[in-house]
Image (spheres, rainbow, N blue to C red):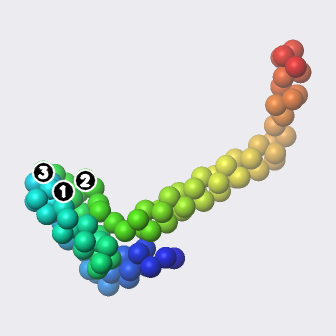
Amino acid sequence: MNEGASTIAVNLALGKEPEEFGVATARRNFADIVNRVIYRREPTVITKNGRQVAAVVPYEALALLAALEAEADIEKASAAFEQYKAQAGTSLGDLKRKLGID
């Protein structure tokens, strides 16, 4: 795990919730919010009408999330392929021949 993501994980594990700002406040203080993320590694949650709608997080945390999602997608695809093989599915070549579209 990289530094940005690990700092967030430790803070959450210790029960330190990210600070929240409404959209209007976040707009007025955007530079301060970005600096908090960059230098203190503290994510910030943006709310609208009392609902959490966005977060400003270190880029490393976003990259880690993307990598985890990609890994999960690969695992799902692999499991689907194994299920296909176990059920003796038809290959694309066989299907094309069967349909006469070689």
Residue 41's x, y, as percent?
A: 32, 76
Helix, strand or loop status at disc 1: strand
- The label shown at residue 47 is 1
Q: Give the spatial CA distance, label 2 vs label 1.
A: 5 Å
Residue 20 sits above or below residue 49 on the image: below
Residue pictured at 24% horizontal, 74% vertical = 36
Task: Report the number of discs.
Answer: 3
- The label shown at residue 49 is 3
Residue pictured at 83% horizontal, 25% vertical = 95
Residue 49's x, y, as percent?
A: 12, 51
Residue 97 sits above or below residue 36 on the image: above
Residue 97's x, y, as percent?
A: 89, 21
The disc, 2 or 1, on the residue closer to the chain's N-terminal end is: 1
Residue pictured at 29% horizontal, 60% vertical = 55
Label 1 Cα neighbours within 10 Å, binned few <14 / some 14-19 / many ≥20 = some
Residue pictured at 38% horizontal, 80% vertical = 7
Residue 89 sits above or below residue 46 on the image: above
Q: Which residue is mark 2?
A: 53
Residue closer to the observer: 90 or 96? 96
Helix, strand or loop status at disc 2: strand
Q: Are marks 3 and 1 in contact (CB under 8 Å)?
A: yes
- Image check: 28 left or right of 94? left
Q: Amino acid at mark 1?
A: Thr
**Does residue 51 show up?**
yes
Label 2 Cα neighbours within 10 Å, binned few <14 / some 14-19 / many ≥20 = few
